[in-house]
Image: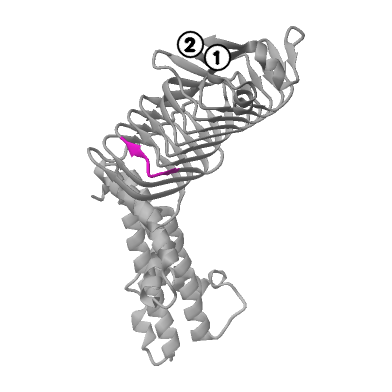
Amino acid sequence: MANRTIIDNIKQFQQYIGRLNNVDTYILEIKYCEITFEVSLNDIVNLFNKKIIKFSVWNCVFKEHVKVQSCNFYSDEKTIFEKNMILSGVYSDEETVKVQIGGVINNNLLINNAFFSSLLIFADVKENVRIWSCTILSFSFSKTDETKILMLDNCSFKDCVDFSQKTYNKVDFFRVKFDNTVTFENTVFKDDAIFCELYLKHDLYFENATFEKRLTLENMTFPNILSLNHATIAWLKIENIYFVKQPLNMANLSVEKVANRETARFLKHEAIQRHNNPLAIYFNTMEMTEYWRETKICQFPEFVLLSLNFLSNRFGKSWIQGIIFTIGVWILFFGIFVMIRDSVGTTFIFCVPELRKEAIEYFWLPNGIEGLFSKEMNVSWWAIVSFFLGKILIGYGIFQTIAAFRKYGKN
């Protein structure tokens, strides 16, 4: 820091402006300086009345906001921007292999209406990155481990783009065109990730990615591969997604919640296309659960049927729940039957030896029917109804338990 020259006045920039190629164009090169005020390239151009078409920075520190407009811009990896960095209409030469944007940007990086025909490298951005209305060959974060917000709007990328092995808080991509492969492998998304109306010519990979909040995929056509292999997603919404060549890659995909029934149905269909029966059953359970939640109480027959399917084996997923349901309805309805028949008692039915034997016989479906209509018992119609309802639900529970046992044998 001691070796840097202090620039605290815009007029001091005059000594760093040099002529480029001809009398009408100039280059601004700043090396080993500390700039203490807000810098706007337009203000420098207007002050000195010189057309600056190239602005290069090496090993500098900018204490305030930096605004660079309509020029060829470069800053090396040792340069530090303490506050916002705004690039508007900047570009790179065709012969340039890569363009470095800052070593450390301690606040926001905003780029709009820019054209980079080379690799764009962001070394370390501490806050938010927003890029809109830009054409870029490709870009990457060479040192950044975590970015709070990454927003791309109406941009175009010509080469492969790698966002892998980083941590992002919020990600929002809208109407972004990718002419080559896009990769988010081993990436962590701590907040919502939204991908809407992407124009893809190749593959999109989210392998081993972790979405801690919400992932939204909307209005996209995948010409080849969308891979969610080994991804972990807390909440997922899929809407208007189409595949041209092959279904979704979803090996060992983990989804905790879905936004709606349509998302669960889509995932179930893709699992079936991949012949992944366990995953298809998992998403079928999600689909039916969402359908159950959507069903109104006025749709009483449908609501009862869905409720029984959920309670008895969680829509074919849990044989343990089937056993619990069967035992539960056995004890409940035999208890109701005994209380109606013999009046309400104060002792648990299994504590009475006579009732214990009768309860075990009640579990065997054909038993006990003849006793209902004997003159000695004088059983009321309410008791008869509870008796047969319990038998029906016991049989239903047994069937649902067997069905859940056979879930992996279903087609």
- Badge 1 element: strand
Q: Is residue 164 visible?
A: yes
Q: Amino acid at mark 1?
A: Ile
Residue shown at 44%/45% (left/top)? 255
- The answer to whether 369 is drawn above or below residue 111 in the figure is below
Residue shown at 26%/50% (left/top)? 410
To which quarter of the image does residue 300 belong?
A: bottom left
To which quarter of the image does residue 174 belong?
A: top left
Asked if the magenta segment contains residue 304, the reply would be no
Q: Which residue is mark 2?
A: 22
User: Along the line of sight, which residue is nearer the eye, 301 or 167?
Assistant: 167
First to last magenta residue range: 195-200
Residue 71 circle label: none
To which quarter of the image does residue 299 belong?
A: bottom left
Q: CA distance from mark 2 to mark 1?
A: 11 Å
The percent coordinates of residue 194 (x first, y second) are 46, 44
- Badge 2 element: strand
Q: Amino acid at mark 2?
A: Asn
Q: Is residue 127 found left or right of 385 in the rendered image?
A: right
The percent coordinates of residue 15 (x first, y second) are 66, 11
Q: Is residue 379 visible?
A: no
Residue shown at 38%/57% (left/top)? 261
Residue shown at 37%/79% (left/top)? 388
Asked if the magenta segment contains residue 196, the reply would be yes
